Image (cartoon, rainbow, N blue to C red):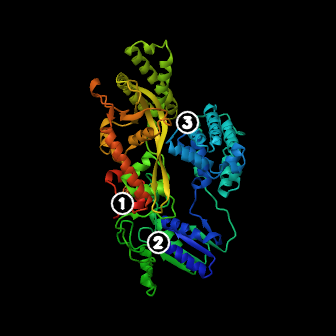
Amino acid sequence: EELAWTAAKSIEAHLVAGKTNIALVAQDRLAARRARALLSRFGPGLRIRDETGWKLSTTRAAASLNSWLELIRSPKEGPSASALLEFLQNPFFDLAHTLHKPSEACVSLVAQLEDILIASQAKSGWETFRIAIERANAYSSSRGTVPHESLLELLTLLQRHHAQWLELKLDCENAYALLQSNLQSMGMAQELEKDSAGKQLLEVLKTFDLGAGAYRQISMRLPEWLSLLKTIIEEASYQEVGQQAEATLSILPLSSTRLREFDAVVLVGCDEQQLPAFSEPPLFFSDTLNRLLKASTLTAQYIQQARDLSQLLISCPQVDLLWQSKSKSGEPLRPSAWISRLRTQLLDWPILEAKPDTYSSLSDPLQEAVTTVNPDIALPISMSPSAYKALRDCPYRYYVRSILGLRKAKEFEEGFDASLAGQVLHALLKNFFQALKTEEQKPHSSIHQGEDARREWMREHLTKYSEKEFERLIKGDARVTGTLRDWQKQIPSFVEWQLQREAEGWQYHDAELPVGFMVSLTDPDGVQREIEIAGRADRFDINTNNSTTAAVIDYKNQGINKIKKRADHLLDDPQLLIYARAVNENAIAAHLPGRNIEQAEWVSLKADLKKADDKIVRSYLVEQMPEMMVQFSEQLSDDLEVLWARKPMKAFAPDSVCQYCEARGICRKGMW
Ligand code: SF4
């Protein structure tokens, strides 16, 4: 980095001195590349010609084409989400042209797609993407916002293109024609035409048009054709287009300075390891063999470089020789032996030490992270159970997430996302129990013919609903099959638990129901506030033996031991108590008129099946429910009052919470 900065500064000094034709000899390629990046900050006034070789495949245009090639080579289920997004985000893809829509209608469409795919962790497969978009659309419609209809259209279109490639009986002629038609219909050909690298890429593609020659009928498989195409692009080099500028900088190897004139030359990498440089003889061509064959030997290379350097020193009025005094491993590095020899002759030739600019100031390390909410920032007037849990876990975390609304930019995680499996399980259980409710209304259903028949019906239908709900996910990502199989093993024991529950008088009533209640408080300014605490309850049951009793259930896609730990900290994660209070305060809104929640429990969807059937523990009850409800309500009012009083919010949580906290980069735990 320091060498690159020194090179850039020395070129800058030449420019300031009015020199217009400068060369940067890239003896150290890495430093030269970095210097080039630094010099590009000079803008269009300095024209940079890189003669050290720049492959066409490293340009953005080639990467864009490559993103399309990657997409069409994906399996028939569809590409990965990252391959899809990489293609859609390439600057040469014209979304408006593809969808035949005005460009205003396409603004931020791809960003929305990215958000949807990441939020639902839809990692691969056309079907998975479609499910994710449909879910997002349903959610938008239910909230009164605009659904993303064009996204489905876009997906269908790309899938059709992909299918065309898979169905094509490929030969050199029709593959070329199809690729060109793809580029045209997606507006890429037109956009590439406007770009200098894009134009050259299109020219290279034309050389691949074998339609007129003898190879037109040669058939091959798609991967072979694609790798042939990629090889051709890989071999092409990119020629930078000339443009008028006040000064020109040529980046070149030492050998290219022969017979050329420059106002000034900067040579980077003049240390003992890089000057002279030599290339390893290829394969078995040892130096001796080369000498016998009269090919280029090491000695010949050295002699040639010495000549090049001396002619450069003689012909150019100013040459800066730059090197580093330390190697990559920190070992001292001497200048090239040639420089040392020159210095024995030129005694007053100075070596200047380049010093990087340094700035010093006093740091003021953080002692702890604590904040007071600015009076201009509005506090949220509704709170979900998870937001309340965040407030209990760590007030600072709540401040970052819910008050400032900051979220970590999500990414696709490795492996199948468990939260997606959780959502599917919730959905299929709801569908199953609704079907059970309907079945119970039918007087001649087998379900009324005793417990065994009921058990049989439940097992059969729960399996059926599970397969149906998982089917689309599996189409998109076959790895989900494992999750389905794990769940299917749980079904018999889950049905037993349900039958047992029914024997105790509990009957399924409703699921996935939004419920909530209001908390009133007076803030320090004397203003009366109404805060809504609301969430979506997994399931409500009613008791057939008691017309005033109901129960709330929360499904957990985790083992019973984790659930027990959760129960130990019930007041810090009072999701069930929130739902219970919501029903008790407004039973009609929760479709439970005249009933009170008197039982709350967690139900594991991942019970330990290794145990004997009668030892499997599937549910865990909230103990001392009435006392807990009182304590929870008092605690909630206190917490909300502290929050609305805008008292200092401290970052404080056990490591188990901090480990997964997104706000860690802001509270900087570990630094204090
Ligand atoms: S890292 Fe820990 S202390 Fe910091 S905000 Fe998150 S939970 Fe709080």
Q: CA distance from mark 3 to mark 2?
A: 53 Å
Q: Residue 437 placed where, x, y %?
A: 48, 23
Disc 1 packing (10 Å; few <14; some 14–19; many ≥20): some
Numbered disc total: 3
Residue that badge 1 annotates: 669
Question: Which sits in the foreground, 88 or 491?
Answer: 491
**Type of the residue with mark 3:** Ile
Residue that badge 2 annotates: 3
Label 2 sits on a secondary structure element that is: helix
**Type of the residue with mark 1:** Lys
Q: Residue 632 placed where, x, y %?
A: 36, 46
Return the disc, 1 or 2, that comes first in the chain's sequence.
Answer: 2
Q: Which mark is residue 131?
A: 3
Label 3 sits on a secondary structure element that is: helix
**Type of the residue with mark 2:** Leu
Q: Which dot, 3 or 2, sits closer to the camera?
A: 3
Q: Residue at x 47, y 22 (%)?
A: 436
